[in-house]
Amino acid sequence: MTICETRPEGLTHTRHLENLLPADFKSLLMGLAGKLYDSLCAADENLGHLEEELLRGGHEVFRQMLEKAAQQKADAAPPLCPKCQNKLGRLSRDHGTTIQTRFGLIRVERARGYCKRCRKWRFPADHVLDLPEEGTQSPGVQEIAALTVSQMPAQQAEHLVERLTGIKVSAATLGRQAREQGQQAEQKRDSLDGQMSQPEGRLQQDSDLQLQLALQPFTLVIELDAWNIRERDDWGQSVSKRAAGEEPSRWHWVYGGTCFRLNQRVESAGGRPEILSRGYAMTRGGVDALKQQLWAEAMRHGLGRANEVLIVADGAVVHAVSQSFKDLAKRSPAIRRFYYEGLAPARRLLRFGSGS
């Protein structure tokens, strides 16, 4: 039974709420109010300074409340393996861990048990709190890392995160968490793409396609492109690679595709052209990876029911992708139509236009 299955009322409920408050919350709040008062009395400070005081001073209040709530949630975690749901044996308690949260560091004590089926030690609380198997960053910090490092180098993200959130997370931690989030996203996408060849894949299609209604004939537009980007890999290994006679790779080909139905073009109230639903596939994994992702996205947007398929791309990309789709066309009627009515004619047209 979790702590919320039988929610208390009245005085008992008030005690539960009080258990989440900091031990000396009145003094914390008075200290924060004092900093706010000093700021509002300063003639050269404005609303931005008041916000900064609340951001920095409020972290300790929130940190202590979060620590108490996380501990209660960890204590209520059932002694089950998060992977196979087998009951854990050889349970022992008071295995502490320090977690980096968006309000600072917190300490949580957890139980540990052994799963005979998986033959691994498990911490059920880690699954309940959504902590990574390797690392001690909260989901909030994981999200911050993924969003910031996807937009800028980790060294710049480190300063931006500290400026906007008031917490200090090292560039190495941000980079590691961003990579782990990216790997999880890739695994999730692979799983969803794999489902598209199964009956349950229909649930991923556009809502009107899921209804299996008779649709007016529509054209599916697929745009393809590839470009070269400079992106550093193998951080900290450049010297060792060069010593071994291997030059570190910096330039990588990125393959991308997008698809949408032509009849889903609309205009906003201001007259701006918009597309109601568009799918994307972007990968550094080569043409084979683009083939799988693009097929799944195209199926989500009606490839199997399209009256026509319009390919917009340069000759090199169409040639590469059409070669990859040729094998799949033998096994799938939808892809066979996509290949013979879309990719192959486009490849012939581009070859003819280029004089090759």
Image (cartoon, grey):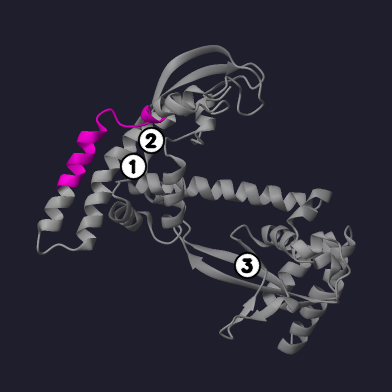
Whole-Å distance between the Cαs marked 1 and 2? 8 Å
Q: Residues within 10 Å of mark 1 (few under 14, many from 20)?
A: many
Secondary structure type for disc 3: strand
Q: Quadrant of residue 127?
A: top right
Q: Which residues are magenta?
A: 17-34
| Circle 3 or circle 1, nearest the eye | 1
Instruction: Residue 314: give x, y in percent of width and height.
Output: 67, 79
| Above-or-below relation of 76 to 143 | above
Q: Residues within 10 Å of mark 3 (few under 14, many from 20)?
A: many
Q: Quadrant of residue 95?
A: top left
> Residue drawn 67% across and 19% down?
117
Instruction: Residue 138: give x, y in percent of width and height.
Output: 43, 39
Q: Nearer the viewer, residue 135 or 273?
A: 273
Instruction: Residue 228: give x, y in percent of width and height.
Output: 53, 69
| Circle 1 or circle 2, nearest the eye | 2
| Circle 3 or circle 2, nearest the eye | 2
Q: Which amino acid is tagged 2?
A: Leu
Name the residue beneath numbered marker 2. 66
Q: Are marks 1 and 2 in contact (CB under 8 Å)?
A: yes
Q: Which amino acid is tagged 3?
A: Gly
Q: Are marks 3 and 2 in contact (CB under 8 Å)?
A: no
Name the residue beneath numbered marker 3. 256
| Above-or-below relation of 350 to 49 | below
Residue 95 appears anywhere in the view: yes
Magenta stretch prevailing secondary structure:
helix
